Structure formats: structure tokens, C-alpha cells
Amino acid sequence: MKKIGLTGGIGSGKSTVAALFKEKGVPVFIADVEAKKLFEEEEVVNEIKECFGSSVISKNSIDRKALGQIVFSDSEELKKLNNIIHPKVHQAFENWFSQQKSPYIIYEAAIIFEHNRQSFFDKTLLVTAPKALRIERVMKRDSVTEDEVLKRMNNQWPELRKKELADYTLDNVKIDKTKHQVNKYDKIFRGI
Ligand SMILES: CC(C)(COP(=O)(O)OP(=O)(O)OC[C@H]1O[C@@H](n2cnc3c(N)ncnc32)[C@H](O)[C@@H]1O)[C@@H](O)C(=O)NCCC(=O)NCCS
Ligand SMILES: Nc1ncnc2c1ncn2[C@@H]1O[C@H](COP(=O)(O)OP(=O)(O)OP(=O)(O)O)[C@@H](O)[C@H]1O
């Protein structure tokens, strides 16, 4: 069973593309969803409290906004959070993967290349869109300011740098063209 790493910067449309693969019956693992699930575990809440202090805890659970403000303004703090979350996400993936039956699976994560994880996958597919459009999409989706989007973007590599490493690229601007490309890549991934 092949592993396809689906990545792209914030607002590029990774989740939109992942949902199109899922509609075609492809098993999809979304790293961010798994990370969010972990925040419900008491042990993880305690670990995060110990690391970042009680200002990131509200009513015994993680205040994502407060934590986001800390980690997206300081890459060292983000590293600490990643060190807590990522090994657990990886373990969750291994458990999930062992239960799948399909010619290939999709693993969606924003930061595959930033963490040098590309060799974990058989192939990588990079979702791209112009920067201004990505900012506009996220501002609308999350009701946040341009500055907040840029802070997140600054913790990710520019698209051009990722393009050099990706096996395939999917340009996600017009949704019809996106669907067409998903069909094309589905055929390719079934054949590799
Ligand atoms: C810091 C947190 C709590 C902020 O939550 P919030 O709801 O405000 O933002 P959200 O999760 O929707 O993230 C917004 C976007 O930021 C980017 N982003 C998220 N985590 C990271 C990260 N570790 N490194 C770089 N960019 C990231 C992604 O493009 C993401 O879609 C949250 O992002 C988080 O828990 N991040 C760590 C988990 C993680 O690394 N997830 C990414 C794949 S495992
Ligand atoms: N081709 C498209 N046409 C119109 N809207 C789109 C298109 N692709 C994505 N969007 C919208 O843009 C927003 C961002 O897309 P999506 O959530 O899929 O991006 P993402 O790369 O997963 O972002 P993040 O890294 O923040 O999780 C969403 O509201 C989505 O509905």
C-alpha cells in the first residue's frame, strides 16, 4: 500500500483536495485532525500546561488561540509544541495505516518538507495557489486578520522551495480544474 504525502501551505486547499480523494474512496489521514484529538487527552493537556504555563489552559482544556499566539510568534516555542505533538500523531498514523486496505492512502499535513519527512512517503503531492488568494481564503474561513495569517505562513516554507522537492504539483484555483487534477492523480497513484 503506497503512502502519498499531501501537503501545501496554509490556505492552499489541502483539506479541500483531501476531501476530493476521500470522495473517490481513498483512505485519508489528516495530521491536523489527529493533533486536535490529542488535545482532548488529559496527559497531553498536562504536558502542554507544564511546557507553556497555565495561560494556555482554560477550563481544564487547551486554549488554542492563546497557544497559537505563543507558538506562531516564536519558532523555538513552536518546536517545543511540535516535539510534544508530532511523535503522538505519528503513532496514531501507524495504528490507522495498519488497518487500511487500498492501493494507496493519503496523509495530509502542512509541514512535510519543513520537517524533512518526504522520504517517509512513496510520493508527495503539493497543493499550490497564489499567496494573495491563500491569505484571502484563510481570512474568510477563520475570521482572522491578514497579520494572523502571515504569522502562520512565516513558520512554513515558501511554495517555490517546496515545489523543488515535490514529486507532483496540483494547482488549486478553480475547483473544476482541481477535480480534474484529482482524477488524473488518482489514476497515477493507483498505478505506482
Ligand atoms: C498551535 C495551535 C493550537 C493553533 O490552533 P488554531 O486553531 O489557532 O490554528 P489551526 O490548528 O487551525 O492552524 C492553522 C494553520 O497553521 C498552520 N500550522 C499548524 N500547526 C503548525 C505547525 N506546527 N507548524 C507550522 N504551521 C502550522 C497550518 O497551516 C494550519 O492549518 C495548532 O495549530 C496546533 O496544535 N499546532 C500543532 C499541531 C501541528 O503541528 N499540526 C500540524 C500537522 S501535525
Ligand atoms: N478551489 C477553491 N475554490 C474556492 N474556494 C476554495 C478552493 N480551495 C479551497 N477553498 C477554500 O479556501 C479555504 C482554505 O482551504 P482549505 O481549508 O482546504 O486549505 P488548507 O490548505 O487545508 O488550509 P490550512 O493549512 O489552514 O489547514 C477553505 O475555506 C476552502 O473552502
Image (cartoon, helix red, strand yellow):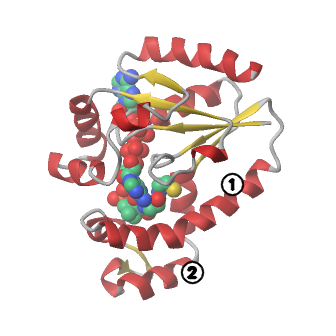
Nearest the viewer among 158 and 43 is: 158
The residue located at (48%, 46%) in the rendering is 113
In the rendering, at what x and y percent does residue 31 appear?
Answer: 56, 52
* SS under mark 1: helix
In the rendering, at what x and y percent does residue 184 appear?
Answer: 60, 13
Nearest the viewer among 123 and 152 is: 123
* For marks 1 and 2 on the same chain, the one whose residue lies earlier in the sequence: 2
Label 2, on which residue?
Answer: 42
The residue located at (63%, 31%) in the rendering is 22
The residue located at (75%, 23%) in the rendering is 192
Q: In the image, is 38 to the left or to the right of 120? A: left
**Ligand 1 quadrant?**
bottom left
Q: As displayed, is residue 119 above or below residue 35?
A: above
Distance from Cα at disc 1 to Cα at disc 2: 20 Å
Q: Is residue 39 visible?
A: no
Q: Which mark is residue 93?
A: 1
Q: Quadrant of residue 77?
A: bottom left
Q: Amino acid at mark 2?
A: Glu
